[in-house]
Image (cartoon, helix red, strand yellow):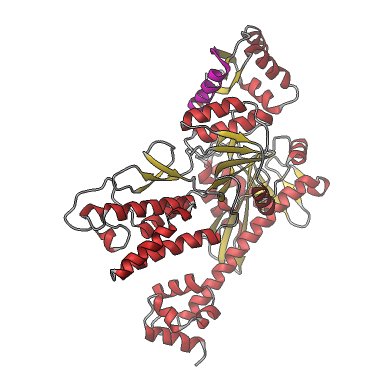
């Protein structure tokens, strides 16, 4: 600390970037300042009250600086250095790359491709798509609806490929479609992706008339499907008619950050951003936004936040330079979006929890806690669950379930070891490991410690929680009466109860599934594959019994087998 104090006294009173570095040369924290000396002294003063500042100074050996010509130059350099060196205590998004976007390419016959970096492909960008898996589904839908070519680059052929016969491509490579017709398909795809369907929907109705007059009924049917998809898109949209055509909204609630994507005057995506490091105040807000767009995500015309930004003018200038056109920043949330957020999300203030956690357990509240439980019915259908709590909220996208493979009969401990081993192996590649909470007493905790030690997971904390008594057993031998600590009681019982619910629901689902299959085994003509189809489609015996024969036939089940199913299930 004394060495750092002496170095700070030598800092110039000029704009620039400062870099805290550890004894091994690694980057601990990088920042910028209009006055380097004053900013570094502020850091030093904050050590007394800010745990994060205390960690930065505790892990740093030296502080260096780079003087810049202007404050904006320092802002740009800071972002480049953070991106390059990934300092431990700067705010960092967990995702390694940007969210996927769809691009309608700038080609003679455009196609649609997926990109995670704005500007890397020449064309018109749409997105981002949240969650990420929807980008691939939307790309497939664009090919199915609008028949944009599937080959990239477009080849020269003498005959159509298989995708043409599957109805996924209109085969411009062999002139199966005119350039004018293809261009309308491209504009229709863009309208579908942007939500501004009014631009092309009347042209599509005209196209149906033209095809019908020429008795090209198959082509007319394709266009009718396109129109139906566009109309359904508008009808299903929950929030329409917003006063903003294109914006990204960052809603800050403590250390929770909700991203709401607005395109075509409507909400098209939403997601909580996850971080490897968090902070407080304007610096945190600034770094969330610069970190998000620094990963190559699409930059809209407007950024909306519910908080002020310390570097607002620099951020606007930086985003405008990256986009190539003006980008605005506003702090007024449209009423429709505010109502949408209030209806769908609740934000947890973890301030009191963090204080009690540190006071009682002696270390900082982890960002992530994973809860585990085992569920069985007399040794049958034994399953395990893993639920995830992150920064105040249960993250259901991260839940995992396990069917026990190596244990026969009732053996709670062996089943638990199998689940924990399968899950803990994932921790070997994780930079920051979660706190583990097991539903059970000291015996269950011991199983977690056995698996932890077997895998050499140093630093992994493992707790268990006993029902009724609500006693927390820790890996350092403590027994904490949670009734004496209400914030901890709410936290750990919430995770424990959710792990129990998730395991029980999976156990019940397996029992129902196997019960249904046992019934179907008795029906002539229903083999393994047809059982799977019937289960995935209907889930219960009653729903199969109510299904018309024609509906069963559309699933590929022969009429005589469909009749057997109806007869058996109706008792006839």
Q: Which residue is pictured at 64% across the width and 56% down the height?
A: 499
Q: Main secondary structure of the magenta part?
A: helix
- Comparing 29 with 531, the one in front is 29
Give percent across and percent down for residue 310.
Answer: 65, 26
431 shown above or below 73: below
Q: In x, y percent, where is residue 175?
A: 22, 55
Q: Is residue 360 left or right of residue 546?
A: right
Quadrant hosting residue 315: top right
Please report the residue visible at 34 percent of the width from the left and 42 percent of the height from the top.
Answer: 106
Eyeballing the image, is 364 above or below 465? Answer: above
**Percent coordinates x, y for residue 340 in the rendering:** 65, 52
Magenta residue check for 82? yes
Residue 105 in sight from this viewpoint: yes
The answer to whether residue 326 is magenta is: no
Quarter of the image holding residue 115?
Answer: top left
Q: Quadrant of residue 163?
A: bottom left
Residue 292 position in % (x across, y down): 54, 36
**What span is colored magenta in the figure?**
66-84
Residue at the far bottom: name it. 572
Residue sitting nearer the eye, 309 or 415: 309
Quadrant placement of the N terminus = top right
Q: Residue furthest left?
A: 158
């Amino acid at each position: 600390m004394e060495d750092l104090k002496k170095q700070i006294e030598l800092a110039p009173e000029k704009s620039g970037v400062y870099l805290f570095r550890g004894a091994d040369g690694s980057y601990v924290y990088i920042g910028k300042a209009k006055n380097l000396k004053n900013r570094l002294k502020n850091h030093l003063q904050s050590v007394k009250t800010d745990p994060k500042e205390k960690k930065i100074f505790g892990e740093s050996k030296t502080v260096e600086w780079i003087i810049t010509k202007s404050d904006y130059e320092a802002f740009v350099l800071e972002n480049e250095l953070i991106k390059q060196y990934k300092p431990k205590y700067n705010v960092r998004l967990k995702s390694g790359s940007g969210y996927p976007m769809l691009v309608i390419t700038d080609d003679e016959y455009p196609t649609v491709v997926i990109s995670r970096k704005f500007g890397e492909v020449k064309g018109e960008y749409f997105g981002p798509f949240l969650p990420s898996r929807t980008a691939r589904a939307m790309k497939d839908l664009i090919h199915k609806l609008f028949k944009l070519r599937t080959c990239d680059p477009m080849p020269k052929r003498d005959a159509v490929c298989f995708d043409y016969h599957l109805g996924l491509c209109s085969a411009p490579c062999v002139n199966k479609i005119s350039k004018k017709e293809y261009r309308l398909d491209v504009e229709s795809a863009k309208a579908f992706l942007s939500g501004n369907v009014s631009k092309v929907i009347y042209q599509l109705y005209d196209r149906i008339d033209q095809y019908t007059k020429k008795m090209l009924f198959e082509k007319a049917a394709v266009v009718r499907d396109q129109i139906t998809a566009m109309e359904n898109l508008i009808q299903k949209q929950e929030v329409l008619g917003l006063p903003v055509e294109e914006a990204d909204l960052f809603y800050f609630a403590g250390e929770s950050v909700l991203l709401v994507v607005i395109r075509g005057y409507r909400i098209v995506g939403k997601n909580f951003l996850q971080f490897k490091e968090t902070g407080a105040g304007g610096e945190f807000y600034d770094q969330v936004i610069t970190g998000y767009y620094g990963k190559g995500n699409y930059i809209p015309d407007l950024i909306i936040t519910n908080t002020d930004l310390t570097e607002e003018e620099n951020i606007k200038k930086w985003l405008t330079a990256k986009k190539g056109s003006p980008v605005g920043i506003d702090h007024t949330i449209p009423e429709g979006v505010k109502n949408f957020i209030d209806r769908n999300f609740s934000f947890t203030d973890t301030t009191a929890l963090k204080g009690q956690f540190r006071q009682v357990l002696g270390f900082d509240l982890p960002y992530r806690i994973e809860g585990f439980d085992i569920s069985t019915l007399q040794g049958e259908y034994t399953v395990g669950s893993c639920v995830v709590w992150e920064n105040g909220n249960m993250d259901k996208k991260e839940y995992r379930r396990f069917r026990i493979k190596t244990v026969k009969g009732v053996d709670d401990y062996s089943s638990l070891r199998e689940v924990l081993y399968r899950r803990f192996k994932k921790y070997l590649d994780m930079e920051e490991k979660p706190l583990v909470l097991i539903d059970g007493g000291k015996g269950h905790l011991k199983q977690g410690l056995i698996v932890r030690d077997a895998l050499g997971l140093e630093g992994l904390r493992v707790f268990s929680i006993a029902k009724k008594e609500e006693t927390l057993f820790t890996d350092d031998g403590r027994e904490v009466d949670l009734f004496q600590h209400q914030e901890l009681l709410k936290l750990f019982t919430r995770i424990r109860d959710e792990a129990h619910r998730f395991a029980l629901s999976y156990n019940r689902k397996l029992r129902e599934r196997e019960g249904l299959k046992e019934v179907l085994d008795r029906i002539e003509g229903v083999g393994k594959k047809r059982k799977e189809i019937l289960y995935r489609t209907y889930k219960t015996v009653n729903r199969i019994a109510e299904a018309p024969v024609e509906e069963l036939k559309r699933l590929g089940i022969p009429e005589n087998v469909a009749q057997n199913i109806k007869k058996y299930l109706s008792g006839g």
